[in-house]
Image (cartoon, rainbow, N blue to C red):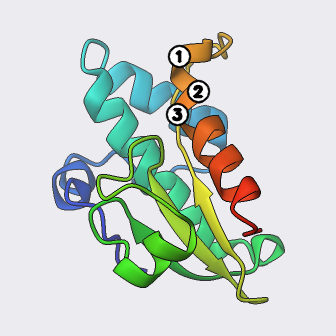
Amino acid sequence: MTSKHSQAPVLISQGVFDSVKTFSEFEQRVSALFDTNTKAQGDAFEIFVEAYLATQPILQCQETWLVGDIPVDVRESLNLPNDATGIDGVYRSTLNNLIPYQVKFRSNRPALGFNEVAPLRILANVTAHSGLS
C-alpha cells in the first residue's frame, strides 16, 4: 500500500513505521520522535489510519481520499465545505457509503475537548439534516 499523505515519504524515511508490532509501540515511537512537534505526530497518525482503513476488512474500505484530494462529487454528496474543515478524509465502503473521518493523536489518551471535535460534529449534523446518510 502506498500512502497518499504528503508527509508519508518523510516519515517513512525516518523509520517511524519500521518493524512496529503493536499500537502501543507505534504510539510510543511517535510520541518520542516528535515530542514537541504535534503536527508531525498528527501526520504520522493520519498515515497510520490510512493504512488501517486499507488493511482491516471489518471497515470494508474500498477507497480513501485525504483532505485536499476529495473529489467534488464526494464533497457535494456529503455537503462538505470546499476546505473540508473538520475532517481528515473520507472513505467509501464496499456498500458504497461515504464516511468522513477525523484523526486525533493522543498519547496517554487525554479526553478530547469540545473545540477539537465540534467541526466534525457540525458537519455530521449538516449531513444528517440534508437527507444524506
- What residue appears at the point 72 percent right and 79 percent down from the top-left corner? 97
Q: Please give the count of numbered marks on the rendered protein.
A: 3
| Numbered label attached to residue 119 | 3
| Numbered label attached to residue 115 | 1
Cβ atoms at labels 1 and 2 below 8 Å apart: yes
Q: CA distance from mark 3 to mark 2?
A: 4 Å
- What residue appears at the point 53 percent right and 41 percent down from the top-left corner? 103
Q: Can residue 19 be seen in the rendering of this structure?
A: no
Q: CA distance from mark 3 to mark 1?
A: 7 Å
Name the kind of residue labelled 2 in the image. Answer: Ala
Name the kind of residue labelled 1 in the image. Answer: Asn
Name the kind of residue labelled 3 in the image. Answer: Pro
- What residue appears at the point 44 percent right and 51 percent down from the top-left corner? 88
- What residue appears at the point 68 percent right and 12 percent down from the top-left corner? 111
Task: Please name whichever residue, 23 or 127, is drawn nearer the observer in this view of the structure.
Answer: 127
Determine the image quadrant of residue 57. bottom right
Q: Residues within 10 Å of mark 3 (few under 14, many from 20)?
A: some
The answer to whether 35 is drawn above or below residue 95 in the figure is: above
Cβ atoms at labels 3 and 1 below 8 Å apart: no
Cβ atoms at labels 3 and 2 below 8 Å apart: yes
Q: CA distance from mark 1 to mark 2?
A: 5 Å
Image coordinates of residue 129 in percent, x first then y, are 74, 54
Task: Please name whichever residue, 115 or 109, is drawn nearer the observer in this view of the structure.
Answer: 115
The answer to whether 3 is drawn above or below residue 94 in the figure is: above
Image coordinates of residue 62 in percent, x first then y, are 62, 86
Q: Residues within 10 Å of mark 2 (few under 14, many from 20)?
A: few
Image coordinates of residue 78 in percent, x first then y, are 57, 67
The answer to whether 5 is drawn above or below residue 75 in the figure is: above
Q: Is residue 21 left or right of residue 86?
A: right
Q: Residues within 10 Å of mark 1 (few under 14, many from 20)?
A: few
| Residue placed under numbered mark 2 in the picture | 118
Image coordinates of residue 76 in percent, x first then y, are 47, 73
